[in-house]
Amino acid sequence: MFLEIVTPDEKVFEGEVVSASFPGSDGSFQILNNHAAMVSTLGKGDIRYKPEKKEEVHILVEGGVVEVMNNKVNVLVEKIFAEQ
């Protein structure tokens, strides 16, 4: 599936991933290929995503919004605290 993460200032990541996990406002959730369409707000926490054939990446964010539709995941985050 295709993941795009942006802030108001920059594009943080764009590419194919195997999975992605998010700090939802009502609890954490994971998105895998062929996930149902959805929109959710994000709370402060760790976004984790696994690019194909690479190690998992962690990004600490303050909040934002995620939209999932047709194997494309769009994420708009307010602020990034740290990237590992």
Image (spheres, grey):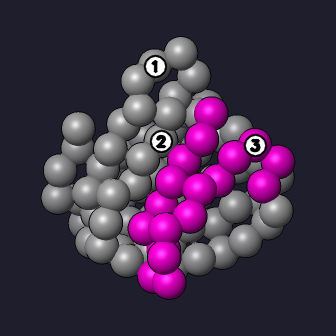
The residue located at (60%, 41%) in the rendering is 19
Which secondary structure lies at badge 3?
loop
The residue located at (79%, 66%) in the rendering is 37
* The quarter of the displayed image where residue 39 is located: bottom right
The residue located at (45%, 82%) in the rendering is 25
| Tag 3: amino acid | Asn
Identify the mark nearer the N-term, 3 or 2: 3
| CA separation in Å, label 2 and label 1 | 10 Å
Instruction: Give residue 16's position: percent from left, percent from top.
Output: 61, 31
Identify the mark nearer the N-term, 2 or 1: 2
CA neighbours of label 2 inside 10 A, class few (<14), some (14 to 19), many (20+): many
| Label number found at residue 13 | none
| Label number found at residue 49 | 2
| CA separation in Å, label 3 and label 1 | 17 Å
Instruction: Give residue 5's position: percent from left, percent from top.
Output: 46, 51
| Label number found at residue 33 | 3
Magenta part, dominant SS: strand
Which secondary structure lies at badge 1?
loop
| Label number found at residue 54 | 1
Q: Is 69 situated left or right of 58 in this image? A: right
Range shown magenta: 18-35
Asked whether the viewer can see residue 2, the reply is: yes
